[in-house]
Amino acid sequence: MTPRPVVGLSRPLPEESLLALRELADVRMPPEDRRADLADVLRGADHALVTPYERVDDALLDACPTLRRIITVSAGYDHIDVAACASRGIEVANTPGAVVAATADHAFGLLLAASRRIVEADAYTRSGSWSGGVAPFLGQDVHHSTLGIVGMGRIGQQLARRAHGFDMEVVYHGRRRLEPTLESRLGVRRLPLEELLAHSDAVILQVSYSPGTHHLLDERRLALMKPSAVLVNTSRGGVVDDAALARALSSGRLAGAGLDVFEGEPHLLPELRSLPNVVLTPHLGAHTVTTHRRMAQEALTNLIGTLRGAELENRVTP
């Protein structure tokens, strides 16, 4: 009799979500009331579901030699050594579809908060400093301004749709041009990166992190932006040179920023923490109840499909 495959979950999931999976495989997961060592959970497993909070590296893979497939409940997969997995014949997949709308919402929220100085005004009001009259928080208009989107994948396209609700002109930069019919439907036009930076009143970054996008916005490119512009980064830390951004914000060279990701997170540059014209959130792009459920279900559906003989979807290994 062929032994049942074993699936290891790095985090517990509700039992009602696991009914279909348990029909096809034995499931291991840590208890609800404590964190377990990941290697202990995955040792002897054939398949694994992990989250961005677990590091999958050579040490873990050496401890879990039976692994054949890893699915991360996230769009990003920089917590997984994909090359090490590929060299061992382990397939890796992510869950990019479920995070799209929530990440676009969060990016637009950061744009509004930074442009209209909402966090500064909130702190001012709570402190009791407001004594009536006009508060000293002149912001930047979002409506009828120009939004530059760097990275026109699924999230970028959702951003474009939201921007048109604010009557914004939308320009984008990406490695490849969209199909002309899609450009027309989205109401966007493609520009070289430097031209986009100089032309836009607000820039949202939504690109993956790689050696090619490391410090994509460095001191030189940040200097191309309008002094009245706002920068939002909801992609990955390292796409922006955070030290150069802090200098631009502190000198008035840039009006504001909204950041959900950082170089070396969770550690932040002290300079960023001390600036009033930057809105900081702790990597919350997809952090909603509904989105988390959708991500887990997307990963489970993908895994169950492979156990039934289908090809792995959203594969990131070669």
Image (cartoon, helix red, strand yellow):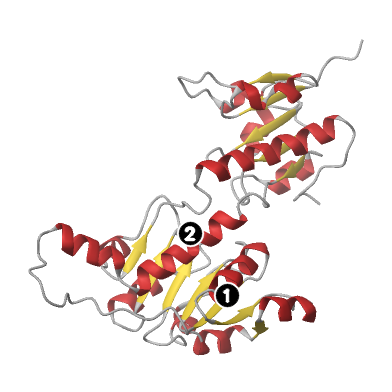
Kindly state the secondary structure of the residue where label 1 is placed: strand
Residue lying at 25% horizontally and 66% vertically, measured from the top left: 120
Q: Badge 1, how many Cα within 10 Å: few under 14, some, many 20+?
A: many
**Can residue 235 be seen from the camera position used here?**
no
What residue is disc 2 on? 106
Say what secondary structure mark 2 lies in.
helix
Residue 40 locus on image (x, y percent): 60, 21
Task: State which quadrant residue 131 falls in.
Answer: bottom left
Residue 136, can we see it? yes
Residue 48 position, x and y percent, is 69, 31
View extreme (left): residue: 131
Q: CA distance from mark 1 to mark 2?
A: 14 Å
Give the crowd class for mark 2: few <14, some 14-19, many >=20 residues within 10 Å: many
Dividing the image into 4 quarters, which one contains the N terminus? top right
> In the image, residue 130 lies at what x, y percent?
11, 67
Q: Residue at x 74, y 20 (%)?
A: 22
Residue 253 lies, with reference to residue 298, above or below; the image says: below
As drawn, the residue found furthest toward the right would be: 1
Say which mark, if any, is on residue 149: 1
| Disc with the residue nearer the chain's start (1 vs 2) | 2
Q: Residue at x 67, y 52 (%)?
A: 96
Image quadrant where residue 62 sits: top right
Give the residue type that dot 2 points to: His
Q: What amino acid does circle 1 point to?
A: Ile
Residue in the foreground of this view, choosing between 261 and 308: 308
